[in-house]
Image: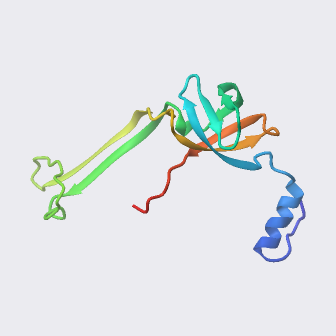
């Protein structure tokens, strides 16, 4: 790569892309999940056949997976006066509630389901597809 890129931001980006070359993740498509895991299948819009699990790579956040998290809660009773949502209270003399749970294991269960719309990217000249994320129709809310 050149030591120094010349021009404005767009020109510099074009120089970097020209030096790096073609990206295998070159095509984004919309698809529908036709069968959930473990026998995952999707149908890409405008493609006649369905792709099976062997043809797919799935982003981890769309699978059942575990994460270690810290859960922290702080609440000031005086500031919460007039809130419309009820909040839990402890019985200490200050009226505040604060606690932390560290190194809590959470398991995420929201795996892909039949009917989910997904964004996929092709690689290896269309031999493999990466399911990047779910997509939804934006309703403005």
* Total numbered circles: 0
Q: Give the residue furthest to the bottom.
A: 8
- Image quadrant holding the N terminus, namely bottom right
Residue 54 versus residue 7 in the image, above or below: above
Q: Is residue 108 left or right of residue 15?
A: left
Residue 2 versus residue 116 in the image, above or below: below
In the rendered image, residue 87, in percent from the top left (x then y), is placed at 18, 51
- The type of colouring in the image is rainbow
Quarter-wise, where is residue 105 in the image? top left
Quarter-wise, where is residue 117 in the image? top right
For image coordinates 48% across by 57% down, the residue present is 138
For image coordinates 66% across by 34% down, the residue present is 57
Q: Give the residue furthest to the top.
A: 39
Residue in front for this viewpoint, 81 or 56:
56
Residue in front for this viewpoint, 9 or 102:
9
For image coordinates 58% across by 39% down, the residue present is 32
Q: Is residue 133 left or right of residue 72?
A: right
Q: Is residue 110 left or right of residue 23?
A: left
In the rendered image, residue 92, in percent from the top left (x then y), is placed at 11, 49
For image coordinates 83% across by 62% down, the residue present is 16
In the rendered image, residue 38, in percent from the top left (x then y), is placed at 56, 23
- Image quadrant holding the C terminus, namely bottom left
């Amino acid at each position: 790569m050149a030591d120094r890129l010349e021009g404005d931001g767009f020109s510099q980006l074009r120089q970097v892309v020209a030096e790096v070359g073609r990206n295998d993740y070159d095509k984004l498509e919309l698809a529908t999940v036709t069968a959930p895991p473990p026998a995952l299948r999707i149908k890409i819009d405008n493609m006649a056949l369905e792709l099976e699990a062997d043809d797919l790579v799935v982003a981890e956040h769309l699978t059942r997976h575990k994460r270690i998290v810290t859960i922290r809660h702080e609440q000031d009773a005086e500031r919460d006066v007039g809130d419309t949502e009820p909040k839990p209270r402890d019985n200490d003399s200050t009226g505040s509630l604060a606690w932390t749970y560290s190194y809590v294991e959470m398991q995420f269960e929201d795996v892909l389901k039949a009917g989910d719309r997904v964004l996929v990217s092709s690689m290896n000249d269309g031999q493999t597809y990466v399911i990047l994320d779910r997509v939804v129709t934006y309703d403005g809310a």
